[in-house]
Image (cartoon, grey):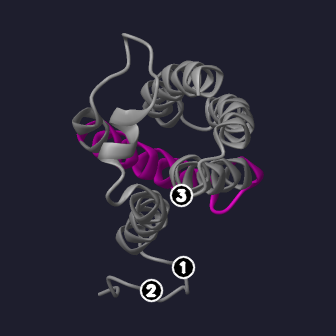
Amino acid sequence: MTSHVVRRNGSISPWLALAGFVAAVAVAALLGGLGVAGTADEYRSLNQPSWAPPSSVFGPVWTVLYAMIAVSGWLVWRRTGWSAALNWYAAQLALNAIWTPIFFGFGQYGLALLDIVVLWVLIGVTVWKFRPVSKLAAGLLLPYWAWVTFATALNTSIWLAN
């Protein structure tokens, strides 16, 4: 019988790997969460476009997106192990993690815009790299890419208005 953590041949259990992807995404989310703790009032006080969602929308949306991001990375890992495609995945996840502290923690809306534009590009590259490996993994990133497209427009509008 194989271990649930490490198999006899030394490979990592798929479930442990999934836990690792969930943990990596959770770290990105927690960094973002630290950046937004107590910022609902700040967000409301910004000059925003009429189409800006209330701050209460972001938590539920990101919870679903982060789950999809974790599963997407794991699906690719299951087929390739750690690969060049997952380097792009890791890079976009790092940019995702630092956007919120830049925007809310430091109030640097222009720098946050630069971060999110590069993030948007890296998500696109990740989708492109994931597609030949797993169409499902690539597809799981599309709602994330769409949300970041919306967030980029919102970041741009807030930067210009403030």
Residue 142 locus on image (x, y percent): 49, 25
Eye-nearest disc, 2 or 3: 3
Q: Which quarter shows the N terminus?
A: bottom left
Along the line of sight, the residue nearer the viewer: 79 or 105: 105
Crowdedness of circle 2 by 10 Å Cα count: few (<14), some, many (20+)?
A: some
Q: Which mark is residue 11?
A: 1
**For the stretch drawn in magenta, what is the main secondary structure?**
helix
Point out the stretch of residues depicted in magenta.
60-85
- 109, 96: nearer the viewer: 109
Is the C-beta separation of discs 1 and 2 under 8 Å? yes
Q: Which residue is mark 2?
A: 6
Residue 24 placed where, x, y %?
A: 49, 66
Q: Residue visible at 29% across and 36% down?
A: 55
Residue situated in front as seen by the camera: 114 or 13 = 114
Name the residue at 38% across, 19% down: 52
Residue at the spot 31% in from the left edge and 45% down from the top edge:
40
For badge 1, the amino acid type reads: Ser
- Mark 1 crowdedness (10 Å alpha carbons): few <14, some 14-19, many ≥20: few
**Residue 41 screen position, x and y as percent:** 31, 44
Q: Quadrant of the C terminus?
A: top right
Label 1, label 3: how far apart the Cα atoms are? 40 Å
Res. 90 image quadrant: bottom right
Reading the chain from its start, which is encountered first: label 2 or label 3? Answer: 2
Q: Secondary structure at mark 3?
A: helix
Above or below 38: residue 92:
above
Mark 1 vs 3, N-terminal side:
1
Judging by the rendered image, the residue that carries numbered circle 3 is: 105
In primary-sequence order, the first of circles 1 and 2 is 2
Q: Secondary structure at mark 1?
A: loop
- Apparent side of residue 46 relative to residue 4 in the rendered image (left or right): right
**What is the CA distance from the residue labelled 2 to the residue labelled 3?**
40 Å
